[in-house]
Amino acid sequence: MTKLFIITVLFFSGMLLIATEFRFPKPEFTSGYESPILQQPLPTAEWMPYLALGLLLLVMILTGYAVYKWRSRRIQTVLIVFSLAFFGFFREGCVCAIGSIQNVTAALADAGFALSLPVLGFFVLPLLTALFFGRLFCGAACPMGALQELVLVRPLRVPKTLDRVLRLIPPLYLGAAVLFAFCGLGFIICSWDPFVSLFRLSGSVFMLGAGGFIVILSIFIARPYCRYICPYGVLLKAAAFFSARQVSITPDECIKCRLCEQACPSDVIIPPRPRKYSEPGFAAVHRIQWLLAITPGIIAIGIIAGYLLAKPATALDSQITLLRNIKAGNVENEAVSAFLATGTPVKDLAIRVQQRKYKLKIGWMLFGAWSGLIIAGSLIAASRRRRNQDFIPDRMNCVCCSRCYAYCPRELKINKNGTTGNSPEPQASRLQPRPGNAVGGC
């Protein structure tokens, strides 16, 4: 792991030296719909985004050591506080890995869109880290996750059915953000980010209220934004699925005491497979086969729905709306007056509108296909059977918070004997499970 991090540091250092001519572009929202009015961050020095990128790399390196080598929740808490202070309040949440999804999409859709190296680095670096070491970015480097992590006091368990339904929102939100950025309708992640107003201590009453509501909710529900809204988490999950390293609750052997399962605030601890399932094996196999057979039909329904939504969605495009107002003779419209004053032929606008309509149609159909694939995939995933013999974290959903370390008796015994680990022995009260959850053997 050390060699890989050193190579990564050298790579990004070289890239920073040869790309000093890049500037950090501010998001531009050009859609026709009304977006929340947010205060733009003050101009910063050209080197500041590169410093932020370097600090992001450093925080994730230290988080990796805290999670895998030192197994220290205390060190990770220090990193969480730093990320919240620097990436959150000092940097005002911009640039962030979550919003960079739109910048990368816009650059792929439009060759003329300027994509700076810091924005690309904030998008790629957490994904590369997750590909090898899991979601270390979520563990301490993300300011949004840091704020939710610090205020968590009394975690409550979300019902499984509700949890599965709510987890459908992030991939759909990701598809919508990519769709809007691809079609030039705006950056909806930045427009509706509930934490930006909190970090900048300004904004509309609605967005401040939304951010405050999520913070209050985070006192009782572990990371509600990360689990049920964050679109970047979908990409991190996909990368973490292939990760060779994952969090190990116990430093040696699992004694199946279930304390980690009860302690995990995000409910991502996978229990061992039961000795006997409630249904025979062939029934689960037949159900998965049936779901795989109807998956193309679900995707086709999504494509049709996207095709039908493409036409009314043209009202969100400012250029299409402009051409409609011109054809309707609405010369009193400010946008129409400004366009006619430029002397640009209406024919040129009509050509651009046709191109944008085609892009909207393709984009909405792809969004429909993506939505169908997500729904079908969630049904298939819910039908899988567990194969693990011990209690293990779900590598896709685990955010590397290190909370489970303090509840593992094997971890506490080894730390007390001084053979490994640096985490302090927690108080006995911290080993108590959450109310309403019985603790016992499997």
Image (cartoon, rainbow, N blue to C red):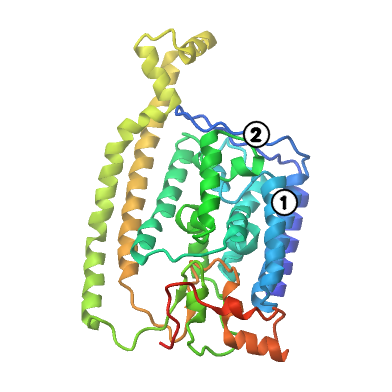
Q: Position of residue 238 (x, y in %)?
A: 48, 63
Q: What residue sits right under mark 2 in the picture?
A: 40
Q: Position of residue 393 (x, y in %)?
A: 50, 75
Q: Is residue 417 left or right of residue 375?
A: right
Secondary structure beneath label 1? helix
The residue at the point 40 percent across, 22 percent down is 321
Compared to 431, does 237 lie above or below?
Answer: above
Inter-mark Cα distance, 2 to 1: 17 Å
Q: Is residue 100 left or right of residue 303?
A: right
Quarter of the image with the C terminus in it: bottom left
Compared to 202, does 17 lie above or below?
Answer: below
Q: Position of residue 125 (x, y in %)?
A: 63, 58
Q: Amino acid at mark 1?
A: Phe
Quarter of the image with the N terminus in it: bottom right
The residue at the point 37 percent across, 62 percent down is 164
Q: Which mark is residue 290?
A: none
The residue at the point 38 percent across, 41 percent down is 363
Closer to us: 197 or 245: 197
Closer to us: 102 or 414: 414
Q: Position of residue 142 (x, y in %)?
A: 62, 56
Q: Residues within 10 Å of mark 1 (few under 14, many from 20)?
A: some
Compared to 328, does 244 lie above or below?
Answer: below
Q: Residues within 10 Å of mark 2 (few under 14, many from 20)?
A: few
Q: Amino acid at mark 2?
A: Gln
Q: What residue sits right under mark 1 in the picture?
A: 86
Secondary structure beneath label 2? loop
Compared to 230, does 429 lie above or below?
Answer: below
* First in residue order: circle 2 vs circle 1: 2
